[in-house]
Amino acid sequence: MPAQGERSCDKGDGLSNQYRKRYHLLIEQDGASGIEQFEIRSGLVKAGLVVVVVLMLAIVAGGAYFFGDLQAKKRTGQLIDENQLLSHQLEQVRGELSTVESEVDSLVNREELLRLRVDLPPVDEDVREAGVGTLVPHEGEVIGDARVEELLSTLDHLERRIAVTRQSYEEIQEKILDDEQRLRHIPAIIPIREGRLTDGFGYRRDPFTRRIQFHYGADFSAPRGTPIYVTADGTVVAVKRAPGYGKMVEVDHGMGYTTIYGHLKTAHVRRGQRVERGELIAEVGNTGRSTAPHLHYEVQIEGTPVDPLDYFYEGYFLWANR
């Protein structure tokens, strides 16, 4: 037993000695022959190391916080500058959109006047607003900035208004082209450029019988050989001599319109020939039932004679100054 106790005591002394370890620091000074010795306990060394580590960690953490704060402040300043620039740009865009809206309003006003001129009905105001529908946007699809959302909404509505106006202008163009095509087939010009209107459509005294009879055309007095021009696009359907008319030309203009040119000296067209408004087709003569050189000109719709002056651009101004 005593032996065991001694061994136990020796073990305890070993542990105690371990904790009592000391470190010796030898320092040799320059120019001196002696060496100074310092003794440092191991506990102090460990404590010092812990303090150094803690200080280093504190310095690193503090530096990270300091530089992070600087970066945050720098980024905040950049965001403020960017936001101010964005606000300025948004104001510019808002002003430009306002100008575009005014120009679109002007185009709409002109378009409405053009629709009236070409006999098209006005565009309904509900259609003009160009309304649309949409589903509820998914999360992340909304921008979030009310100013940007407002501008985008204005731009979207403006684009739809422009689309409606563009379609309206296309309708106007088509109507004008259709009208031009139709007008090309309406006998709307005076058939001679030299001469005088001497008799019109309606009842008159027949120069041969002296009886009141209906006159189905308009007479233009002019020298023999005066050029005669077709009054609308069409196809020559007859070049012949006919009772009362003498030598005559008949032109079918389509859409039910037909014109007849009588008492001719000569014809410059043949049956089946296509002619265009203003093209030379004949010369004034004195053939048939005529008292002097003149052109007898008729306009018929579906075979029924109508007053030619109703179709002349000059119309009754010509009749008033005859």
Image (cartoon, grey):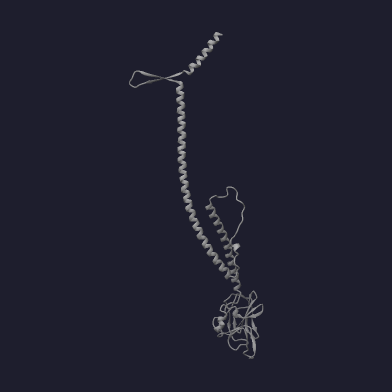
Q: Quadrant of the N terminus?
A: top right
Depth check, front residue: 237 or 9: 9
Q: Residue at x 46, y 41 (%)?
A: 71
Depth check, front residue: 84 or 296: 84
Q: Please give the name of the residue rendered at 46% of the width and 32% of the height, measured from the top-left corner.
A: 58
Residue 290: image quadrant is bottom right
Q: Is 272 on the left or on the right of 25, as rendered? A: right
Q: Is residue 290 above or below residue 48?
A: below
Q: Which residue appears at 47% of the width and 42% of the height?
A: 72
The image position of residue 46, as x and y in percent, is 46, 24
Q: Name the residue at the right extreme.
A: 303
- Counting from the top left corner in percent of width and height, residue 266 is at 59, 82
Residue 293 in which image quadrant: bottom right
Estimate the x, y position of residue 24 in percent, counting from the top left. Answer: 42, 19
Extreme left residue here?
31
Q: Is residue 24 left or right of residue 260?
A: left
67 over 118 or under it: above or below: above
State the image quarter where residue 191 is shown: bottom right
Q: Quadrant of the C terminus?
A: bottom right
Closer to the camera in the image, 192 or 98: 98
